[in-house]
Image (cartoon, rainbow, N blue to C red):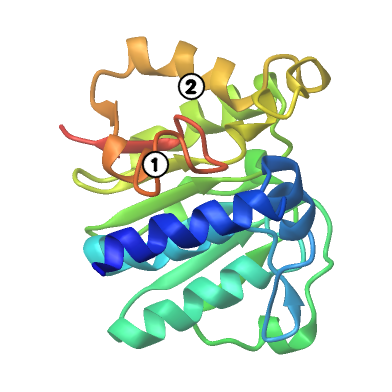
Amino acid sequence: MSLLRRIIRQKEKLRVRGENFSLTGVYKGHYNITYKGVPCLKCPFDYVLYQMIIQEVKPDLIVEIGANHGGSAYYMADLLNAIGHGQIHSIDIADRVPDEVKKHPRIKFFFDGWEKYDLSQIKGERILVIEDASHHYDNTLAAINHFAPVVTKDSYLIVEDGIIDRLGLTENFNGGPVRAIKEFLPVHPEFVLDLKWHNFFGEGATFNTMGYLKRVK
């Protein structure tokens, strides 16, 4: 029996037993993801995609808007260790980051919010920006407009958590990230939605719905 047929038969068995995955289950589970014991709130699909994107871009600097507990910065810093290159600037409005993460030599934290972050600190030929702050439409649009100019050609402006639409939470965020992206792209032709990542695990199988924006010029 071929591998494909075995996979299909196994899926049929799981369906009969009622063992189906759900978006809600993945969403609840992602709140419990940790990296080296530090909370790292990432969809497991996106967790995998980030290591491939970093390997592809090999950024000199990653600017992360939304540090939370520092788990994602910690994870990405170790990915940078693996390629032997790069730094991270992680920004938030509150310091919830444990000392062990702050000691990582590839990470520098800023706790005055993205509006007060000095763009002149951004140096390098390959700059990757990740917007993972409040997810509210107004804040998201303002942040991506502010940081878009520093993203370098063939790198990415990644806008996280457009998945709120499919979770029925759009109104809570005044339209959220997807609304912001839909307004951003028509006036920023230098960016395109990279469907390679958006559909990597299946059509729209990511929490970062429409969020992998590649700079092409």
> Would residue 161 be found to the left or right of residue 83 on screen?
right
Where 117 falls versus 7 (above or below)? above
Question: What numbered label is drawn on residue 64?
Answer: none
Question: What numbered label is drawn on residue 181?
Answer: 2
Which residue is depicted at the point 83% across and 21% down? 172
CA–CA distance between discs 1 and 2?
A: 21 Å
Q: Position of residue 63 (x, y in %)?
A: 49, 55
Which residue is depicted at the point 27% across and 42% down? 196
**Residue sitting nearer the eye, 91 or 123:** 91
Give the secondary structure at mark 1.
Answer: loop
Q: Position of residue 89 (x, y in %)?
A: 54, 63
Where 213 falls versus 123 (above or below)? above
Mark 2 packing: few (<14 Cα in 10 Å), some, or many (20+)? many
Mark 2: which amino acid?
Ile
Q: Quadrant of the N terminus?
A: bottom left
**Residue sitting nearer the eye, 14 or 29:** 14
Which residue is depicted at the point 47% across and 11% down? 183
Badge nearest the viewer, 1 or 2: 1
Q: Position of residue 217 (x, y in %)?
A: 15, 32
Mark 1 packing: few (<14 Cα in 10 Å), some, or many (20+)? few
Q: Which residue is denoted by mark 1 in the rendering?
A: 202
**Residue sitting nearer the eye, 10 or 185:** 10
- Residue 111 image-quadrant placement: bottom right
Which residue is depicted at the point 70% across and 55% down? 17
